[in-house]
Amino acid sequence: MRRLPIYFLVDVSESMVGTPIEQVQEGMRTIIQELRVDPYALETVFVSIIAFAGRAKVLSPLTELYKFYPPVFPVGGGTSLGEALDCLMNDIDRNVVKTTLESRGDWKPVIFLFTDGNPTDSCDAAFERWNRKYRSHCNLVAVSLGENVNLKTLSKITDDILLLKDTDAESFSKFFKWITASIKTTSVSVTSTASDEVKLAPTSGINLEKIEVGNDGLAGHDIVDENFAVIHARCQHTRGDYLIKYYRRRRPLEGMERFHATDFKLVGAYPVDRETYASLSKGEGVKINTLELIGVPACPCCGNQIGAVACDCGHIFCAGEDPDITCPWCGMQGTLTKSGPGGMDITRSLG
């Protein structure tokens, strides 16, 4: 039996923490539920999920549709798109059956890449490998979740680039229904017409835009994703880890509307599993001054009202009403005080 391999290459970097990753999780469940009642998809579709942050990991190997159950998505530090592509290509080499002179192999793999940020690794080698050996034998659809992605980077690896402008619950729901319809249409096409090309469903009624971007060479890499500032923190009481997420905003200066200031406004704080987060993270991070961060969260692990206290060791943790505190990172003890007028330099993750 010829299989139709469907890969989901999902960005699980820190900028996806909170509502975006929850909506992707729910969307994947919806896709699988709806595909299971389609006879063409049930006959041909095999699904795999690869998650990537600072590192990439196969969460679900290529599995027959009726046996597939969506995994729980983790979160990691960084956005290593080059490493994600390498992980995908290695998996294709291992698990996709190639056509030979004696027999027909699997249909062209269809890859849906979801990302909301910019690469924090050097992608050049992976991009060159993809374009030389895999691009013509796969169908890669890259989807920008929001408008923070460098679409020119994505144009280095595919001509099918889509922008999902709105990332509210309704827009995500319609988007994942579109993904489902595209997979159904492709599964019908490969079985009835023997076409190897992906058949994307119409985008009417969805705030989903096809993007045309010029291709003028290989992409470089960003040291840090400037669209978000994410701080890795630890609870003083439970020792649980959490991420504090801020989004970059540009606002006019009062009385000088032609000039703008840039800062980062609080989105929220989210607990993460320490070992899983570490296994998907890569890079040392960079410094950011606390004056650039607007808003302080409560601790999502214990409820302490101050979730962003900086220790001399450079790490962030939470504090409650007791001014005598102990850093859960290094064990240093001290008394809580306010930072000076110049703020403090703390470490932000790569995003």
Image (tube, helix red, strand yellow):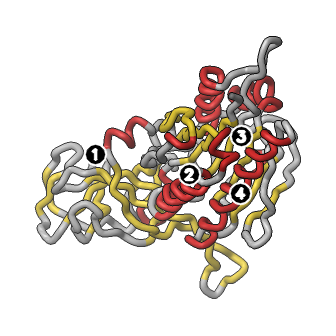
The Cα–Cα distance between marks 4 and 2, rounded to whole angstroms, is: 12 Å
Q: Residue at x 80, y 24 (%)?
A: 132
168, above or below 145, in the image: below
Name the N-terminal-most of marks 3 and 1. 3
Type of amino acid under label 4: Ala
Residue beneath disc 1 = 313
Residue sitting nearer the eye, 57 or 128:
57
Q: Mark 4 Cα within 10 Å, few/some/many (few <14, many 20+)?
A: some
Residue where numbered disc 3 is placed: 110
Image position of 49 with respect to 150: above or below: above
Disc 1 and disc 2: Cα gap in Å? Answer: 46 Å
Label 1 or label 4, whichever lies nearer to me, is 4
Depth check, front residue: 84 or 64: 64
| Residue 75 appearing in the image | no
Residue 83 in the image, given as x and y percentages of width and height: 59, 32
Q: Name the kind of residue labelled 2 in the image.
A: Ile
- Residue 32 got which mark? 2
Residue 115 on image: x %, y %: 62, 51
Q: Check disc 1: other Cα within 10 Å, few if <14, some if 14-19, many if 20+.
A: few
